Amino acid sequence: MIYTVTFNPSLDYIVSVDDFTTGKVNRTTKELIYAGGKGINVSIVLKNLGYDSTALGFVAGFTGKEISRLLSEKGISTDFVKVTNGISRINVKIRSDRESEINGQGPAIDKDSIDKLFEQLDHLKAGDVLVLAGSIPNVMPSTMYSDIMAFLKGRNIRIVVDATQDLLLNVLEYKPFLIKPNNHELGEIFGVELKTREEVVPYAKKMQEKGAVNVLVSMAGEGAVLVTEEGAVYMAEAPKGKLKNSVGAGDSMVAGFIAGYLQSEDYAEAFKTAVCTGSASAFSEELATREEVEQLLSAHKFNL
Ligand SMILES: Nc1ncnc2c1ncn2[C@@H]1O[C@H](COP(=O)(O)OP(=O)(O)O)[C@@H](O)[C@H]1O
Ligand SMILES: O=P(O)(O)OC[C@H]1O[C@](O)(COP(=O)(O)O)[C@@H](O)[C@@H]1O
C-alpha cells in the first residue's frame, strides 16, 4: 500500500489577475479552487496514474470538510485525523505575469491528534510506501518527520520525504528512500545558489552522504537531476511546452517517480516518468493525467 501524510492540507485558491500590483485593489479574471497540500497532490496524481493510496494527515473546520469532500469526489481514500482547533488553511496562488504564492501556517495540532496518526502508522507493513510531504504548522517541532521515521525504523518501509530545511535535514540519518528538494531548497541548505544541473550534482551527493538513499532535485523549467543509491547520476532537460500552472508540479514529480519505480524497479525509468509527470502538470490547468504523462514520455528525448 501507498500512504501519503499531509500535516498541513490546504484549499488552493488559484486566481488569475492581469498586471498584479501590490498596494492597490486587483480584480481577478479567473478563479479556481482545489484540494492541495503536498501529500494530497501526490495521492491525486498517483490515482491519475493508476495507483491507489490512502491520504493521511490532519484537517480542521469547514475548509477541512471541503478538502475531504473534494478528495472523495475523485475517489481517493482518506483517513484524516480531525483537529478541533481552527481551520485547514487556504493557500492563495496568484497567476499574473509571474506566479506568487501565499501559503498559510495551518492550525496547531494537539498531542492526542498526533498520537492518533502514530496509531495509524503503526499498521504499516514491510514493502509499503510512505510519503511525508509539505510543511508542518509552525508551532510544531522540526523533528516531526524524523520522529515518524524513528518510530518506523527497521520495518522495511520505503519513505519519501518532500520537505525543506531542518524538517528535511533531520530525517537524513534515518535513510529516506527518496528526497525531492528543488534546486533553491537544496542551495539554501548549503548557503549557495544552484542554477545549473551540473552545479546541483555535488550538493545532491552531499545529501546522500548525510543519509538519503536517492536524491531527486527538481529545477522547474530547467529539468531535474537524480543521484541514485547505485551511484548513477541522471540529468534531464524539461520537456518543452506552455506553462499553465506550476502549482503541484513538484508533487506530481514525486508521484511520477513512485509510479515509475513501482512499475519498473528501475531508477532511470522512474526518473523519466517523474520528469514527464512534473512537466505534464506544469502544462495543464489541473494536475497531470495519465494520457498527458504518456504523451510527454513518448515525445521527449532523454539522454541518460
Ligand atoms: N516551466 C516548466 N516547464 C517544463 N517543466 C516544468 C516547468 N515547471 C516545472 N516543470 C517540471 O516539474 C518538475 C517539478 O517542478 P518544480 O517547480 O521544480 O517543483 P517544486 O514545485 O517542488 O518547486 C520539474 O523538475 C520539471 O520536470
Ligand atoms: O506545505 P507547504 O510547503 O506550505 O506547501 C503547500 C502547497 O504546496 C502545494 O502542495 C504545491 O506544491 P508544489 O508546487 O511544490 O508541488 C500546494 O498544493 C500547497 O498549497
Image (tube, rainbow, N blue to C red):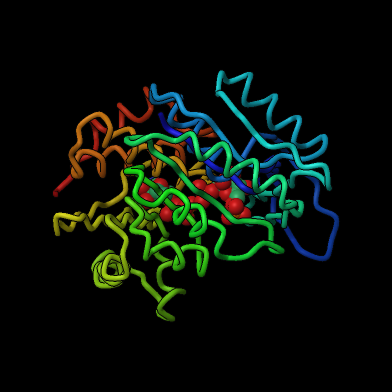
Looking at the image, which is closer to me, 301 or 231?
A: 231
Q: Is residue 266 above or below residue 237?
A: above
Looking at the image, which is closer to me, 97 or 179?
A: 179
Which quarter of the rendered picture does the N terminus lie within? Answer: top left
Q: Is residue 226 above or below residue 34?
A: below
Looking at the image, which is closer to me, 271 or 301?
A: 271
Left or right: 53, with 120 as reference point:
left
- How many numbered discs, if any? 0
Residue 278 percent coordinates (x, y): 40, 42
Left or right: 228, with 223 as reference point:
left
Q: Residue at x 69, y 34 (%)?
A: 33
Q: Is residue 270 above or below residue 222?
A: above
Report if residue 99 is visible in the image.
no
Residue 106 percent coordinates (x, y): 73, 52
Q: Residue at x 34, y 49 (%)?
A: 154
Q: Residue at x 30, y 57 (%)?
A: 215
Quadrant in which residue 28 is drawn: top right
Report if residue 27 is visible in the image.
yes
Left or right: 61, with 182 as reference point:
right
Quadrant in which residue 234 is drawn: bottom left
Looking at the image, which is closer to me, 287 or 7?
A: 7
Q: Residue at x 33, y 58 (%)?
A: 175
Residue 23 percent coordinates (x, y): 82, 65
Residue 27 percent coordinates (x, y): 80, 46
